[in-house]
Amino acid sequence: MSEGYEWLAIIILLSMIGGLPRIFKGPTRADAMLAAQLCGTSSVAILLLYASALEKPFLNDIALVFSLLAAVATVSFVRMTWHAPEEVDGDH
């Protein structure tokens, strides 16, 4: 694997590790979800780096599945936590 790819993967991994405490400590559920999205995006980036460096095209497919799962998780989170504003009398 190219040394440049290795350093990029390490930098991305460090950013992912930096977000882990936010997943567990919050302070809000939205903060935890954003940190989880950071981990998901970072794992996709690392997989794409490895796919390119090792010339393993199946890793591209795995990265695609991870990115689709991240999108589904985000939509599910928003649907579970979104509260529509209550209607005020007279507003339609």
Image (tube, rainbow, N blue to C red):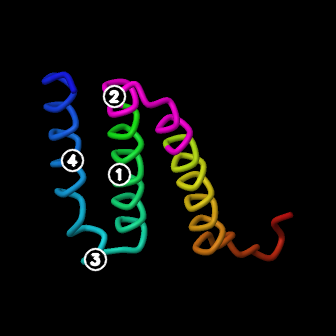
**Label 3: which secondary element:** helix
Which part of the image, by quadrant, shows the C terminus?
Answer: bottom right
Query: Within 10 Å of the Cα at label 2, are there few (<14), some (14-19), or many (20+) other Cα atoms?
Result: few
Q: Which residue, given by chain and number where applicable, does mark 4 sit on?
A: 13
What is the three-letter code of the residue carrying label 2? Leu
Residue 52: percent from left, percent from top: 37, 24
Q: Which residues are magenta?
A: 49-62
Height in image: 5 above or below 66?
Answer: above
What is the three-letter code of the residue carrying label 4? Leu
Which part of the image, by quadrant, shows the N terminus?
Answer: top left
Whether tag 2 and tag 3 are in contact, CB under 8 A, the answer is no
* First-in-chain label (2 vs 3): 3
Q: Magenta stretch: residue 18 in it?
A: no
Instruction: Please tell me in which quadrant of the rendered image residue 10 appears.
Output: top left
Q: Alpha carbon of mark 2 to alpha carbon of mark 4: how far?
A: 18 Å
Q: Alpha carbon of mark 3 to alpha carbon of mark 4: how far?
A: 18 Å
Q: Which residue, given by chain and number where applicable, does mark 3 sit on?
A: 24
What is the three-letter code of the residue carrying label 1? Leu
**Label 1: which secondary element:** helix
As drawn, the label of residue 87 is none
Q: Alpha carbon of mark 4 to alpha carbon of mark 1: how far?
A: 10 Å
As drawn, the label of residue 54 is 2
